[in-house]
């Protein structure tokens, strides 16, 4: 990866600094000087990341008839990685600078010189990206296991278990979200390339012959998932792998690419992996992983379509795409225009001031809303500063309790994007926010309410 700033995009340093300052993402083990290419998600980051995973699970498992979920372990039988080809072939070409001794991925280096000091580089040698560790008390070759470099193999080795326990018919798929580990050579670029990261992967099993049609289906579905969650279409594109780029077993592969601040790069890969994986695991485990087709009365090995996405890369794309700045009379308004489903905090309850009289009602409103969503209560500093703070972390709604509220039990809702405001009775506050968050029309509303909700 060559780091270049794309003109017109928020620069990476700005995002890194916002993430640190507001508690989205911190460098791992920072007090000890950090741990290369590992990051920790802070109080807001963990909410955002969970929301990304929730949205993926909802679209790919909850709302589909043909999908089920799985959560396999990170440590797997070492033969898994022999069968999958990772022991033999999961390697990148590594070059080292003869002058400053920094190591680089050969295909990430321009002009054949060291990107740091311009020094001469060694010949490339292959470097396996899997992290090794040992099980049990003896650290010998027989006890070597790997931290999984992808979640996919946990799905393949459970193919029979899922088939037998759910009595599924083809086509059907298994979805999994979980940590993966790769000893990446070229790092940097924040959470784009990490050594410990999370993946959201699907293995979709189909009858041979229907694979091309399902491949097309998944490329479309996965592309639309990003745009439905607010990523601008002009920042997304599909790139088909050239024949010489395809893995030997893959029939077709598309990368869904995003225009990151560092340039167009892979966000997700969708591959037609044919029957390679199930055949390999049948061969190495000695277990019959075929599927009995009731129609043709034949045993077949299903073909597999694999949409494989990164949680962290998605988080980075959602952050980069939603970042916005507006000049106003107080200076600069920074806004994360995150999709409501992804926003870490859905609403903030803000008493107009710290006046004691406002506290009981403000707490009452807060307690009602926090039962439904992640909600913040903030009474520090001026109301304007508090609005700004919520805009910067992407909170869609601020609910203000003022002195008038004590008399009429109404509060003001302010919306993040257009800063429009509406006053509603506290009794309909929760359904009003619900309607706005989920797009459900609402009958009981004050004048102008339907318009505010976008239903008129
Ligand atoms: P790259 O070419 O960028 O190294 P890859 O083709 O090796 O990626 P895959 O093996 O297809 O990646 O993994 C699927 C997805 O997992 C990627 O599209 C990406 O979103 C995510 N991913 C892979 N490696 C990393 C990493 N080191 N850090 C963060 N996310 C990653």
Image (cartoon, rainbow, N blue to C red):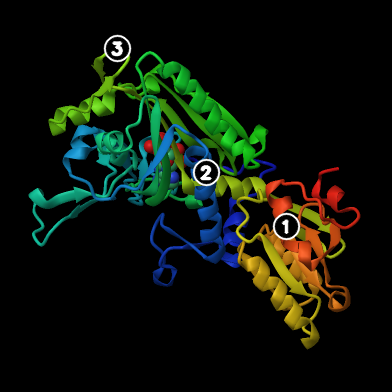
Q: Position of residue 124 (x, y in %)?
A: 29, 36
Is 59 positioned to the left or the right of 180 in the image?
right
Residue 379's label in the rendered image is none
Q: Position of residue 86 (x, y in %)?
A: 25, 36
Q: Residues within 10 Å of mark 2 (few under 14, many from 20)?
A: few
Residue 296's label in the rendered image is 3
Q: Is residue 187 above or below residue 165?
A: below
- Camera-side residue of 95 and 302: 302
Per the image, label 1 sits on a secondary structure element best described as: helix
Residue designated by label 1: 431
Q: How many marks?
A: 3
Residue at horizontal 47%, vertical 33%? Answer: 65
Marks 3 and 2 sit apart, C-alpha to C-alpha, by: 34 Å
Is 316 positioned to the left or the right of 137 in the image?
right
Q: Residues within 10 Å of mark 3 (few under 14, many from 20)?
A: few
* Between discs 1 and 3, the one toward the N terminus: 3
Q: Is residue 296 above or below residue 148?
A: above
Q: Residues within 10 Å of mark 1 (few under 14, many from 20)?
A: some
**Residue 108: in sight, yes or no?**
no
**Residue 394: in sight, yes or no?**
yes
Can you name the residue that lies furthest to the right here?
447
Per the image, label 2 sits on a secondary structure element best described as: helix
Residue designated by label 2: 58
Q: Is residue 357 above or below residue 185?
A: below
């Amino acid at each position: 990866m060559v780091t270049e700033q794309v003109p017109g995009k928020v620069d990476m340093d700005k995002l890194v600094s916002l993430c640190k300052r507001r508690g989205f993402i911190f460098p791992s083990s920072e007090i000890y000087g950090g741990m290369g290419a590992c990051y920790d998600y802070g109080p807001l980051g963990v909410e955002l990341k969970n929301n990304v995973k929730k949205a993926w699970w909802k679209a790919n498992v909850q709302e589909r008839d043909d999908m089920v979920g799985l959560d396999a372990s990170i440590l797997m039988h070492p033969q898994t990685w022999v069968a999958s080809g990772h022991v033999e072939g999961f390697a990148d070409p590594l070059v080292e600078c003869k002058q400053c001794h920094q190591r680089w991925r050969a295909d990430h280096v321009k002009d054949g010189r060291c990107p740091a000091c311009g020094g001469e580089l060694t010949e490339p040698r292959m470097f396996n990206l899997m992290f090794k560790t040992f099980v049990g008390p003896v650290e010998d070759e027989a006890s070597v296991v790997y931290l999984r470099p992808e979640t996919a193999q946990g799905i393949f080795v459970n193919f029979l278990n899922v088939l037998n326990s759910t009595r599924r018919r083809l086509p059907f798929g298994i979805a999994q979200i979980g940590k993966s580990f790769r000893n990446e050579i070229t790092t940097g670029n924040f959470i784009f390339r990490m050594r410990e990261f999370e993946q959201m992967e699907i293995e979709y099993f189909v009858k041979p012959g229907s694979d091309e049609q399902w491949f097309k289906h998944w490329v479309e579905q996965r592309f639309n998932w990003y745009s439905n969650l607010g990523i601008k279409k002009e920042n997304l594109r599909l790139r088909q792998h050239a024949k010489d780029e395809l893995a030997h077993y893959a029939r077709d592969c598309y990368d869904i690419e995003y225009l990151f601040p560092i340039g167009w790069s892979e966000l997700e890969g969708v591959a037609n992996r044919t029957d390679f994986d199930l055949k390999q695991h049948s061969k190495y485990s000695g277990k019959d992983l075929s599927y009995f087709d009731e129609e043709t009365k034949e045993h077949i090995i299903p073909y597999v379509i694999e949409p494989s996405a990164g949680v962290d890369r998605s988080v980075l794309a959602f952050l980069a795409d939603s970042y916005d700045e507006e000049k106003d009379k107080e200076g600069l308004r920074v806004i994360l225009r995150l999709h409501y489903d992804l926003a870490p905090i859905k609403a903030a309850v803000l008493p107009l001031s710290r006046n004691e009289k406002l506290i009981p009602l403000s707490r009452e409103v807060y307690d009602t809303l926090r039962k439904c969503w992640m909600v913040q209560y903030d009474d520090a500093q001026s109301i304007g500063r508090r609005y700004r703070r919520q805009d910067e972390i992407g909170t869609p709604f601020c609910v203000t309790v003022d002195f008038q509220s004590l008399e009429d039990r109404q509060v003001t809702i302010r919306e993040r994007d257009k800063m429009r405001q509406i006053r509603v009775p506290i009794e309909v506050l929760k359904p009003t926010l619900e309607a706005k968050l989920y797009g459900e029309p609402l009958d009981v509303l004050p004048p102008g309410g339907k318009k505010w909700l976008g239903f008129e």
